[in-house]
């Protein structure tokens, strides 16, 4: 979640074109995003970062939004040319802090970042639940 130039809250995320009109990394107004979210499944977390860290996170997020990477249907964590939802968030924080914020979980033959594992990460504090 970030504020755009008009001070409005927006969400940066990555979603498959099979579910949304646009495929991959994108942003949308928070109000529109929340219309499609099941109550109790949207969390706003704050990383225990300093002022410089926050500005770098926003800069990296905006850079990735401009690049518009396609959605990663193969869930390949070693290739950042395509990004799935938690891979996108993880990449931004890993580039800044040098460590993953999600745990990998094996499902079948895929090792993907488990989205809910960030809720157990002591580097993050939950500040809001929708």
Image (cartoon, grey):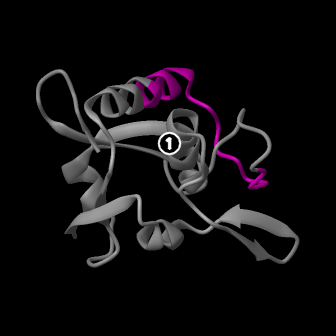
Comparing 2 with 125, the one in front is 125
As drawn, 7 above or below 74: above
Q: Residues within 10 Å of mark 1 (few under 14, many from 20)?
A: many
As drawn, 65 above or below 29: above
Comparing 17 with 58, the one in front is 58
* Residue 92 % position (x, y): 51, 38
Q: Residue furthest right?
A: 109
Comparing 124 with 10, the one in front is 124
Residue sitting at 25 percent across and 51 percent down?
32
As drawn, 86 above or below 119: above
Residue sitting at 78 percent across and 39 percent down?
79
Q: Which residue is mark 1?
A: 93
**Which segment did they paint magenta?**
60-76
* Residue 54 % position (x, y): 32, 34
Q: Does 28 lie within the magenta span?
A: no
Residue sitting at 84 percent across and 77 percent down?
108
Residue sitting at 32 percent across and 50 percent down?
48
């Amino acid at each position: 979640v970030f504020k755009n130039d008009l001070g409005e809250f927006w969400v940066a995320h990555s979603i498959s074109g099979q579910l949304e009109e646009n495929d991959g990394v994108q942003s949308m107004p928070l109000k529109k995003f929340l219309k499609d979210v099941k109550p109790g499944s949207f969390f706003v977390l704050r990383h225990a970062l300093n002022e410089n860290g926050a500005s770098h996170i926003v800069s990296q997020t905006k850079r990735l939004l401009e690049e518009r990477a396609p959605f990663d249907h193969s869930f390949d964590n070693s290739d950042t040319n395509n990004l799935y939802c938690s891979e996108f968030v993880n990449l931004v924080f890993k580039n800044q802090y040098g460590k993953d914020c999600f745990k990998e979980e094996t499902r079948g033959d895929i090792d993907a970042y488990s989205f809910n594992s960030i809720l157990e990460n002591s580097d993050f504090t939950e500040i809001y639940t929708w």
